[in-house]
Image: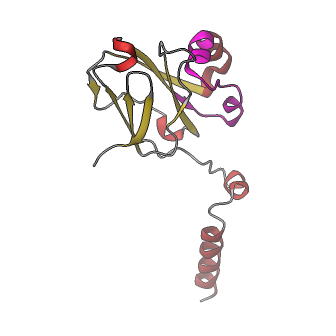
Amino acid sequence: MQPLLSLCFISALAMALNGCAMVGKLLGIEPTSPLRHVKVVAELDANSLTATAIDLVFVYDDTALAVLPKTGPEWFANKDALMAGLALSVDVVRLQIPRGKTVDEAPLPRRHRKAVAVYSYANYITPGGQPQGKLTPYKCAQITLGASAISYQSCAS
């Protein structure tokens, strides 16, 4: 009876502390992104009628998060240096989406389930570009490329 009671206590304690990052680190369990699918839809007038380069950036190290830029123009201007400096801390999936096309299932890196964060950067021609897209909270993210802006939402069921 005693081992069963101890097991119940440990299980209850683990469930109560499940959201605590400190416990996760102590147990070697790091939070990861639930992202499993990415769909990209380019409207006919996307990016002022041009194809759009979009990078999906999978981040595996919390220290790399502070280095990532906040906008697409910053990412594309410094991408080579960032990728060299971050090395194994990130994976980048490069996509080129023509206007009016849809990518139903963007390829994901083999270790995508271990990412602590996932972002997208689009190379838009609009002045100032587009802000970094935060894909981390989605299980299935749909990125819609519009004429002068990008929207993010959960994929339709």
Q: Quadrant of residue 87?
A: top right
Vertical position of residue 129 compared to residue 106: above or below: above
> Where is residue 75 drawn, in percent x and y?
59, 17
Vertical position of residue 68 compared to residue 16: above or below: above
User: Could you tell whether 82 is left or right of 140 in the image?
Assistant: right
Q: Which of 122 and 22 lies nearest the eye of the viewer?
A: 122
Vertical position of residue 74 compared to residue 5: above or below: above
Vertical position of residue 58 compared to residue 83: above or below: below
- Residue plotted at (62% across, 82% down): 3
User: Could you tell whether 92 is left or right of 38 in the image?
Assistant: right
Q: Which of 123 and 55 lies nearest the eye of the viewer?
A: 123
- Residue plotted at (31% across, 15% down): 98
> Where is residue 92 drawn, in percent x and y?
50, 22
Q: Is residue 109 visible?
A: no
Residue range in magenta is 57-79
Q: Which of 20 and 66 lies nearest the eye of the viewer?
A: 66
> Where is residue 141 drawn, in percent x and y?
40, 39
- Residue plotted at (60% across, 69% down): 15
Is 63 covered by the magenta stretch? Answer: yes
Q: Is residue 150 visible?
A: yes
Quarter occupied by the N terminus? bottom right
User: Could you tell whether 33 is left or right of 50 in the image?
Assistant: right
Q: Residue furthest bottom?
A: 1
What colour-coding does the image apply?
A: secondary structure
Is 75 covered by the magenta stretch? Answer: yes
- Residue plotted at (48% across, 34% down): 111
Q: Quadrant of residue 10?
A: bottom right
> Where is residue 146 drawn, in percent x and y?
37, 25
- Count how many numbered circles sit on residues in the image: 0
